[in-house]
Amino acid sequence: MRSIAYGIAILAAAGIMFFIAMNPAEPPADASGPETSPASVATIEKQVPSDAETQSASVTLNVPEMHCPFACYPSVKENLEKRDDVIEVALAPQKEEGVIDNPQVIVTYKQGFSTDAAIATLESAGFGGSTVVQ
């Protein structure tokens, strides 16, 4: 009986080794180092944001329909971050981990942000009654 278990273990190990050998992991994109060709330097220079784009501010929104950190908060975050004028959405500090006892999110936004439009986005996602925290 023991020899059958050893035989199965050997076959399983051989199968795993074969699978790993046939599907090698891809190295990370930056493992070979950054490119230094003139074209890549020009691309990097074009990506530097102007002063108007770097100006940001934040607002805290109360989302009373946000009850759990596992489904509700990720949905709120995803829906708000889909907007072009939103940079980042973070959950406000909570008293207890794994529970939302403070249903507020801190929205970092760009110039041209509209709190009414953000609240409308939340309402269309099922989070009605959201307000701006004063």
Image (cartoon, rainbow, N blue to C red):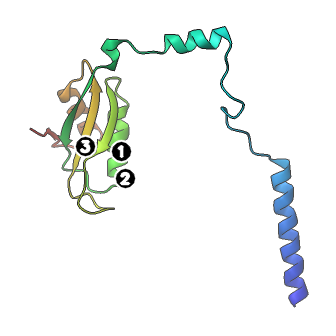
Residue drawn at point x = 87 percent, y = 57 percent: 18
- For residue 105, which numbered disc appears in the image? 3
The kind of residue tagged 1 is: Ser
Left or right? Give the position of 44 relative to 5: left
**Which residue ends up furthest to the left in the rendered image?**
134
Where is the C terminus found, in terms of image quarters? top left
Q: Which residue is mark 2?
A: 71
Q: Residues within 10 Å of mark 3 (few under 14, many from 20)?
A: many
Between residues 78 and 32, which one lies in front from this camera angle?
Answer: 32
Name the front one of labels 2 and 3.
3
| Callout 1 secondary element | helix
Residue drawn at point x = 45 percent, y = 15 percent: 48
Q: Which residue is mark 1?
A: 75
The kind of residue tagged 3 is: Val
Name the front one of labels 3 and 1.
3
Residue drawn at point x = 34 percent, y = 16 percent: 53
How many labels, in total?
3
Relative height, residue 41 to residue 16 (above, below): above
| Callout 3 secondary element | strand
Where is the N terminus found, in terms of image quarters? bottom right
